[in-house]
Amino acid sequence: MSKALTFTRLDLLTVKPYLTVKTMSITVIMCALMAFNPNSSMFLGMSLIFMSVYYSYPFAIAEKNSMDLMYCSLPITRKDVVKGRFIFLALANLLAGSVIAVISVFLTILRGSVSAQELFVVFVSFFTMINIMSCIQFCIYFRFPFSKSRLLAYLPMVIISSVGLAFAQLSTGQNRYFETGNSFETAAALWPAISAVCLALLAACYLVTFSISVKLYEKKEF
Amino acid sequence: MIDNVLEITGLCKDYDEFSLKNVSFSLPKGRIMGFVGQNGAGKTTTIKSVLGMLRPSSGEIKILGGALDQVKERVGVVMDSPYYASEWTVTSLEKAVSPFYSNWSAESFHKALKNFSVSTTKKISDLSRGMKVKLMMAVALSHGAELLILDEPTSGLDPVARDELIEILADLRKSGKSVLFSTHITSDLERVADYVTFIKNGEIIYSGDKKTLLQSYKAVKIKDITEELKALVIGGREFDGVFEGMAPAESAGPFGAAAVSPTLEEIVVYMSREDRNYE
């Protein structure tokens, strides 16, 4: 595990020079625009999606600089590389999730637009969705060259979003999901069950996509 | 005690238009081996297979007596192009790489940087190609590597930088380290290599002592040549009215004073022109 954590540190150092004021400002502006939306759930969901763009940075930078060759020269296995990068992903998701959750709570208190339970359910649902999406993206990045897989990697986002929207349409007859967040009223009451399901989904997702990524990365040639 | 720090046996790697065919050679401890051949002959494919960057179709590779994953800490690597994040400074590179090595010596790293005149504050993207190669060398020399594997480190370097690198390699040999050094600039090997492995079209043509190889042939340059003598010549060609090529030392007698000791470059050039194996 220590080698995997050292690799996570390497990933953080790799990404660090690219987290400039300019790039971060774009995300902050996008999130700030979302904050004007009267619905805090909308801010929460969209901000998580904006943040997920950064998760692909280690792959993009590694490809640009042929860093996979460096990883092969270091005293670590390919499994350590995958493990380290999944730890990076989990940490990034946790950090982004925590920051965005705190801001959402603040906005909710300010406006009182949704209940705490509703906000919690929205957060857990979006957090799970973003994690699943980014885990699937990681499998794709570990299999294909980053430049060729970018479009493919956004398919999970499109599919998951489309399924979500379709489900909302079917269940309510109209797309109230992004309008008021009221469609979560019923779900909010079931927050313990939803949390448990999401937690189980997250654990399964990380486990399965990690195993697949190890197999794919083991086969990759540089 | 390990006699050979690197042993490659029956290494094969198949691509659509190229394949490594049964590559076998070994590098004795404390020696420098030049790995030579034309561009595209299979040098990088072999080295990448040794380093686990490519998956060989078959064959066995033993490094420092074991499998690569068990001995990676003791192997230093320099590839033909830099593989560090271009936005890193040399200092951030050290921060990123050093924790992986239990034997990392910051003192050795900074000493090497000083010797190579590599600035620690510059971004890697701002370093010249020569400096980037020296930086990779500095990393390879800072964790007590016993075996250095260098893939074309001198290509693209100016003669002064190449000369400096050769000096470093000679010093490494003195300290008992072993080096596998791939290059197509054979003049670099003349001074420093103990052994030469020559690869052509994915096949090993020769692997052994450099002196033996140099003594095994004579370079021939002759104006008027008979068909009988021509038949003895390897990789012969007419150039500016002079017939030149190479003959096995044992059959070079009839050429008289026209047969002289060849350079490594001449051997590689003439061998590349002839589909005749020497063992």
Image (tube, coloured by chain):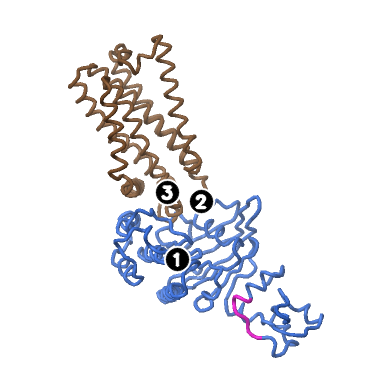
Chain colours: A brown, B blue
Amino acid type, callout 2: Phe
Relative height, residue A122 to residue B247 (above, below): above
Relative height, residue B217 to residue A111 (above, below): below
The secondary structure type at the circle numbered 3 is helix
What is the number of the mark on residue B49?
none
Amino acid type, callout 1: Leu
Packing grade of label 1 (10 A; few <14, some 14-19, many >=20) is: many
Chain under callout 1: B
- Residue annotated with mark 2: A222
The secondary structure type at the circle numbered 1 is strand
| Badge 1 and badge 2 both on one subunit | no
Residue B182: image location, x then y, percent: 53, 66
- Residue annotated with mark 3: A62
Front tag of 1 and 2: 2
Amino acid type, callout 3: Ala
- Residue annotated with mark 1: B147
Residue occupying the point 34% across, 41% down: A88
Quarter of the image with the C terminus of chain B is bottom right
In the rendered structure, which segment of residues is drawn in magenta? B260-266
Distance from label 1 to label 2 (Cα)? 21 Å
**In this orientation, which residue lies closer to the viewer: B21 or A34?**
A34
In the picture provided, is A40 more to the left or to the right than A145? left
